[in-house]
Amino acid sequence: MQHSLIQSAGIVWTCLFASFVVWLYVAAPQSVGDVATRASVTAGTYEVDRARFDAARDLFLREQYAAARDEWARADPARRDARTQFYVAYAFYRQGWGRVYNDDVIFRQGLEAATLAIQLSPEGALAVDDPELKIHSAAELKTEFENGLEQTAEDLNPFKVFRERK
């Protein structure tokens, strides 16, 4: 009786350990902290670090866009929060926007972040109520990126210098 109980417990532990090894292989974490983050995503308890998010927003408002994106990456390491990804995309927009021309490399990165924000938001309808921003939805931001990446005759318009950054 006790012998079969020990065998059963051994089989259960072996299966649990094997599933943990498979999960590690699939998740491919880069650090111990990454293991904890991915485990919380898997368990459905993942949350954004609010203090880091607010610090990143302060950097964003001071027009330190690259530093803000780095801080948002620390606040949302799994890139699972639609609102955070919207702000990351907006930082790309602000950094890549120019009076004469837009930085296409930065705009492409921003387009990827905006697309991710739309995918993460419920029903693809993310709206951010922030009075400091002129664009309030991820779809509108994505449209700005797509229009900025398009090459049209409007790009040669000299009055483009007077346009306003959103």
Image: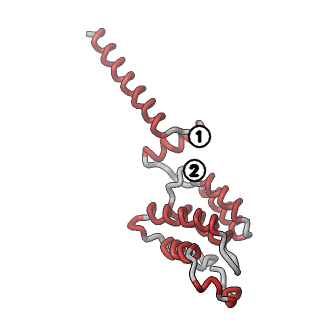
Where is residue 156, by image quadrant?
bottom right
Secondary structure beneath dot 2 equals loop
The residue positioned 57% from the left and 73% from the top of the image is: 149
Depth check: give the residue in front, 131 or 20.
20
The amino acid type of the residue labelled 1 equals: Gly
Q: Disc 2 vs disc 1: Cβ atoms closer than 8 Å?
A: yes
In the image, residue 46 sits, relative to residue 136, either above or below, namely: above
Mark 1 Cα shell of 10 Å, populated few (<14), some (14-19), many (≥20): few
Looking at the rendered image, the quarter that the N terminus falls into is top left
The spot of residue 41 in percent (x, y) is 47, 47
Depth check: give the residue in front, 50 or 100.
100
Task: Please name the residue that numbered disc 1 is placed on.
Answer: 33
In the image, residue 22 sits, relative to residue 54, either above or below, namely: above
In the image, residue 14 sits, relative to residue 147, either above or below, namely: above
Task: Please name the residue that numbered disc 2 is placed on.
Answer: 77
The spot of residue 100 in percent (x, y) is 70, 80
Where is residue 68, by image quadrant?
bottom right
The residue positioned 61% from the left and 76% from the top of the image is: 133
The spot of residue 164 in percent (x, y) is 66, 84
The residue positioned 62% from the left and 79% from the top of the image is: 166
